[in-house]
Amino acid sequence: MDSLKKFFEYALWNSRLVVLVAVVFGMLLALGSLYLATVDVVYALGYLVQYADPALGSGARVDLRTDAITAIVKAVDGYLISAILIIFALGLYELFISKLDIAERSEAAPRLLLIHSLDELKERIASLILLVLIIEFFQQALQLTYDTPLDLLYFATGVLLVSGALYLGTKKLSKNPRE
């Protein structure tokens, strides 16, 4: 019976290695997101070159400017998603598989990658997701037309709500309620 218990505990402990699937595919998704963002940067640079054309009419220039800003925002969004996926993959690796020795010797690692609990991993990912959502909001806002004062009121309300989410997302909760 004791050997059966040891085998079961051994198998149970090593079952944590299935998290390697999430780590590998998380990194592959991060690379894919980096690729998408880099393609968006190439298109944004193309828009910037076209924007300098003196023969461009004012209406076409406004449309090109909107397209360029949208491409830039998409690129920033893609790079943030890549960062989320990298932090996710490295965090899962550190929590379930092994400590990254090379990360512990790095000066940047304490700010970015050293994850000691699932709560830390969730907090870092949540803050990056909030940034992505804010960028998506403003990307959509760039493409809207504001025909009535009510449209502007809706936009202002959206900005207020996004600002509140950003404030609440960055506010640290005190461990001592009297502080």
Image (cartoon, grey):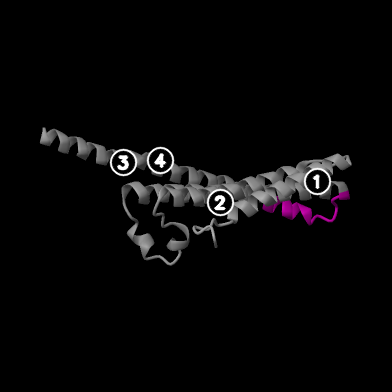
For mark 1, give the secondary structure. Answer: helix
Disc 3 to disc 1, C-alpha distance? 52 Å
Mark nearest the camera among 3 and 1 is 3
Q: Amino acid at mark 1?
A: Asp
Q: Nearer the viewer, residue 14 or 169?
A: 169
Q: Is residue 37 left or right of residue 14?
A: right
Q: Amino acid at mark 2?
A: Ser
**Residue 101 falls in image quadrant:** bottom left
Q: Amino acid at mark 4?
A: Ala
Does residue 64 appear in the picture of this structure?
Answer: yes
Disc 2 to disc 1, C-alpha distance? 32 Å
Which residue is labeled 3 in the image? 16
- Contact, mark 4 vs mark 3 (Cβ under 8 Å): no
Q: Earlier in the sequence, mark 2 or mark 3?
A: 3
Quarter placement of the C terminus: bottom right
Location of residue 58 in the rendering, given as x and y in whole percent from the top left corner? 87, 50
For mark 4, give the secondary structure. Answer: helix
Which residue is labeled 1 in the image? 63
Task: Answer whether residue 83 is magenta in the image.
Answer: no
